[in-house]
Amino acid sequence: MKQGLSLRVSQHLALTPQLQQSIRLLQLSTLEMAQEVEQMLDENPFLERSEDTAERETFGLEQSDVPVSAGEQISDAALAEPPSAPPSSGESTSSTSADTGDGEGLEGKLDGASPVEESWEGDGTVEMSPDDGEWGGDAPARNNGSNSDGDDTATAADLARVPVSLQDHLHEQARCLRLSDEDSAALYFLIESLNEDGYLVDSLSDLATAWWHMSDRSRRVGGDDSPAGFEEIEVLEQRLAMALQLLQHMDPTGVGARDLAECLRLQILELRNTPEARAALAICGQPLELMAKRDIKRLCNLCGIDDETARGALALIARLEPKPGRRFIDVERNVVVPDVIVTHAGRGFKVILNPDVMPRLRVHDVYANAMRQNRGGRDSGGEAGHAAMQQRLQEARWFIKNIQQRFDTILRVSSAIVERQRNFFMHGELAMRPLVLREIADELGLHESTISRVTTAKYMATPFGTYELKYFFGSSLGTETGGNASSTAVRALLKQFISAEEPTKPLSDNQLSDLLREQGIECARRTVAKYREALRIAPANLRKSL
């Protein structure tokens, strides 16, 4: 083998820590973003919350026509999907999927790129700059749940807003019962074993075994397979069975049931003893598939009732609560906080960022000034410490800039969506037009993967409700006139057709497809079934009224 030297020119892309942080912050949701800010405030001494109202740096709609910065171009190049052919010398060799929105492993995918040193030094300056000012001045400071005057005492209104859990509600009732310590402990154990719907999903034998292992008895006996351990588990199971009788007579009715049939039976037993109630009890003893399919003829034969009584019993069952713990679920934790708010402004619409989700951050003035004053007077022994603190200062500055860039990109993408879907904001989802990520990416000069990250887990408050940004993107269906109809508009049209159907004669998927064809929209029966299932609408045989 002949050895030799050769010179080869190649181009590689290296992602700096600043750029990696910018990409990672862009794909975070509002909650994840708040957690990231809290973590950075704990770790970086140069970063603090701003309590004073200051003028924010100008960005957003006014900057929508500004050319894309070099940093964003590098970011888009790093996130672009590599073509099947070998890239040319001017193309990047880094890639990631546009659908996953995952920024992990970017450095590992750089073909032949040298490792990047973790450095936040930037240009090395520690002078005070406009970047050291606060960003997000319109957002109110968070008070961590305390009163403005510093008093941590909760008011009556605050206590009234605290939701009561199902377990707390049941424990309050259990305190009114005169029970022995053993029975009280068994009832407490059952209450804590309920799921959020109020069901007892584990069997009494499994609960007794778990309870026995949690106690000190298992250590004294030595195992549940010993005669003494088996006997004690049987005693605990009997005690749990008696406690279950008490639990199933508590409010809400049906709590402590092991399955849906038992839950319905417990609620029926609380009603008046009527022919319909007795028939409902008999129906609950049959396979639930028959009740779900409303097979009245077979239910009448199995329960020995007539057709009219069976219909009345099914109507009674339909009024029962299948999830007794539903009203105790804390709905506040499921509330979506929008990132963008769209309001009417004259004949158009105004797009603004939600100030409640914008953190107010700034570089600590005292620490930054101390770094600047000590820049030339430090001794030789403090070189390493000074360099480390300088790096933390630059890291704080970059964090503020990256947050600003994140919200700037969200606002730009949201404004482009509102402009493209103007008919939706005027007339509703029936006027939604087809839209793909490529259209917004081409308009803003960004990559599709960037648009995918921006529209994932980001929400927009509109006059018609709060929607995820991905909601405004949809595929197209052909029409008789040669145009395209949005799949979102087709689903809205299906909901209208089904809501207007006769309860005794619901529309089948074939009939719904024919109705869409009458509107000029070509939609096959299988597509109608897919859209109907996505809307969580039952098929025609289950929608049929008795």
Image (tube, rainbow, N blue to C red):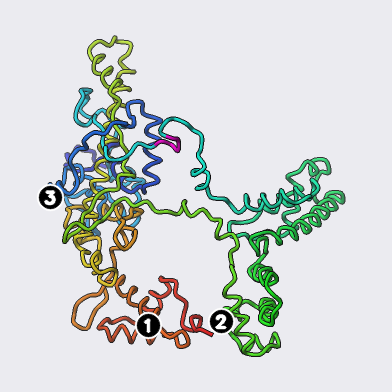
**Residue drawn at x 74%, y 59% as measured from the top left:** 244
Quadrant occupied by the C terminus? bottom right
Q: Position of residue 49 (x, y in %)?
A: 33, 32
Q: What span is in magenta?
A: 143-147
Q: Earlier in the sequence, mark 2 or mark 3?
A: 3
**Residue drawn at x 28%, y 68% as measured from the top left:** 428
Name the mark on residue 65: 3
Query: Going by the picture, which residue comes out furthest to the front?
Result: 156
Spatial CA distance of label 1 from label 2 is 22 Å
**Residue drawn at x 27%, y 48% as measured from the top left:** 353
Quadrant occupied by the N terminus? top left
Amino acid type for the residue under numbered disc 2: Lys
Name the mark on residue 492: none
Q: Which residue is mark 1?
A: 525
Q: Provide the secondary structure element on which disc 3 rests.
A: loop
Spatial CA distance of label 1 from label 3 is 45 Å
Q: Nearer the viewer, residue 133 or 143?
A: 143
> Is residue 189 shown left or right of residue 385?
right
Q: Earlier in the sequence, mark 1 or mark 3?
A: 3
Viewer-nearest of discs 1 and 3: 3
Mark 1 and 3 residues: CB-CB less than 8 Å, in contact? no
Q: Position of residue 189 (x, y in %)?
A: 71, 50
Q: Which residue is mark 2?
A: 293
Amino acid type for the residue under numbered disc 3: Asp
Q: Position of residue 320 (x, y in %)?
A: 59, 71
Q: Position of residue 119 (x, y in %)?
A: 29, 30
Amino acid type for the residue under numbered disc 1: Arg
Spatial CA distance of label 2 from label 3 is 58 Å
Question: Is disc 3 surrounded by few (<14), some (14 to 19) or many (20+) residues within 10 Å?
Answer: few
Name the chief secondary structure element in magenta. Answer: loop
